[in-house]
């Protein structure tokens, strides 16, 4: 692979997709590549990239709600054809400026179908560009199952993509479980191991007293979890420890006031921050949703955890991942059964787990593996 790589990523609620794409961009930059990370979501200053990574921002959009059925702009207004046309033109102009040898789309075509107004023209431009040697998809270990869309996904994969790079362990969570049609993909399918910063941070926790860490990823859909955890705190065996609640940066003040009152003294409420991995490594117990990034960090750090998978709208990803973690012994509280009482019972079960948790998943540094794979498939 020669110098230039362009990565397209769109986060709609939390920032997990952007975090994963940033880790990949950092790994490629570290390998000496000229990397442009093009983001279409709201700015997320807590996601840190190396100085050499060029971060480029499209007009931002996000999901209107947890159903993901409609998209809105930075002001909360539904996007229209003018917005789509403008964003598509800006993306294509960025491509022409970057002239990448390798184009990477994060998740698409396994998701982000609503962005096909810009991604299909981008892919067509790259397919016709003699300078672009490789089009690759970077995707997490589980995708939401939508059987009625499988034919469309496969058509796009076979038309545009040279390889699909799955950031997971096929012996732990086989990608084919959520994408069975991949047997008909004519390109290459690779598994990289989990893409996580936690491997380098494992065992580097600080000297502060151990605490309980409550998190909902980027925090955009964590209100029910924070409410239940705050109310449950003083009924658990770990009530004597500090509890740290990592919430979204836009969490309403009224919610925070209520949760502080419920949780009582010794509870800390603060917005998401880049030191999450070290906080997790030093925690006695985590109470969290089970998005991809949190899952990878839990596996790497071995921190005991109570898992509350997000299941809003038609989302199945976290529920499927939680099933795999349940087989490793992690207590699971389904979202539709979440209450202070159910969470308190699960916390006491989690507190009895050995620390660190002994898991059977082989972890590789997916950042380095992905960088090697992309170098290997490009002429």
Image: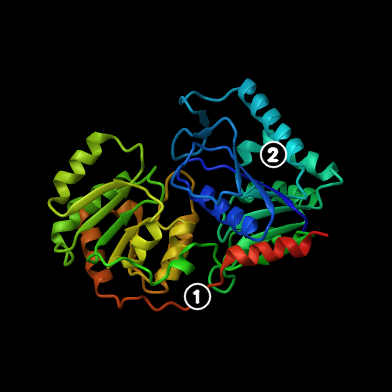
Name the residue rendered at 68%, 34% in the picture.
91
Q: Residue at x 24, y 63 (%)?
A: 211
Q: Position of residue 113 (x, y in %)?
A: 63, 41
Quadrant assignment, res 286: bottom left
Q: Is residue 365 above or below residue 128?
A: below
Q: Is residue 84 left or right of residue 231?
A: right
Residue at (70%, 60%) from the top-left corner? 182
- Label 2 neighbourhood size at 10 Å, few (<14), some (14-19), many (20+)? many
Residue 226, image x, y percentages = 27, 49
**Residue that numbered label 1 is attached to:** 361
Q: CA distance from mark 1 to mark 2?
A: 34 Å
Q: Secondary structure at mark 2?
A: helix
| Disc number for residue 119 | 2
Q: Quadrant of the N terminus?
A: bottom right
Residue 332 vertical position relative to residue 69 in the rendered view, above or below: below
Nearer-the-camera pick, 40 or 317: 40
Horizontally, is 145 left or right of 232 in the view? right
User: Under tag 1, what secondary structure?
Assistant: loop
């Amino acid at each position: 692979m020669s110098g230039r790589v362009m990565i397209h990523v769109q986060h709609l609620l939390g920032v997990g997709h952007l975090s994963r794409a940033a880790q990949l961009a950092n790994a490629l930059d570290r390998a000496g590549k000229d990397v442009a990370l093009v983001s279409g979501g709201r700015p997320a200053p807590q996601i840190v990239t190396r100085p050499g990574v060029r971060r480029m921002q499209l007009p931002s959009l996000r999901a209107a709600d947890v159903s993901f059925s409609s998209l809105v702009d930075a002001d909360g207004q539904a996007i229209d054809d003018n917005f789509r046309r403008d964003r598509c033109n800006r993306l294509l102009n960025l491509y022409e400026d970057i002239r990448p040898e390798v184009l990477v789309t994060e998740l698409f075509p396994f998701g982000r179908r609503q962005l096909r107004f810009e991604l299909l023209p981008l892919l067509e431009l790259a397919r016709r560009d003699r300078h672009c040697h490789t089009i690759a998809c970077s995707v997490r270990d589980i995708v939401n199952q939508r059987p009625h869309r499988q034919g469309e996904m496969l058509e796009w994969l076979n038309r545009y993509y040279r390889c699909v790079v799955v950031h997971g362990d096929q012996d732990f969570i086989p990608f084919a479980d959520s994408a069975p049609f991949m047997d008909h993909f004519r390109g290459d399918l690779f598994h990289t191991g989990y893409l996580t910063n936690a491997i380098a941070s494992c065992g580097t926790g600080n000297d502060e007293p151990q605490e309980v860490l409550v998190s909902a990823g980027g925090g955009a859909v964590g209100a029910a979890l924070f409410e239940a955890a705050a109310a449950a705190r003083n009924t658990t065996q770990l009530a004597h420890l500090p509890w740290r609640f990592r919430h979204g940066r836009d969490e309403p003040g009224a919610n925070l006031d209520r949760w502080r009152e419920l949780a009582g003294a010794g509870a800390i409420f603060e917005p998401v921050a880049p030191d999450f991995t070290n906080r997790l490594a030093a925690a006695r117990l985590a109470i969290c949703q089970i998005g991809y990034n949190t899952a990878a960090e839990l596996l790497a750090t071995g921190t005991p955890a109570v898992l509350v998978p997000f299941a809003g709208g038609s989302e199945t990803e976290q529920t499927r991942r939680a099933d795999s973690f349940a087989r490793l012994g992690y207590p699971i509280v389904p979202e539709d059964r979440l209450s202070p009482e159910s969470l308190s019972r699960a916390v006491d079960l989690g507190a009895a787990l050995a620390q660190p948790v002994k898991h059977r998943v082989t972890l590789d540094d997916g950042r380095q593996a992905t960088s090697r794979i992309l170098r290997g498939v490009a002429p």
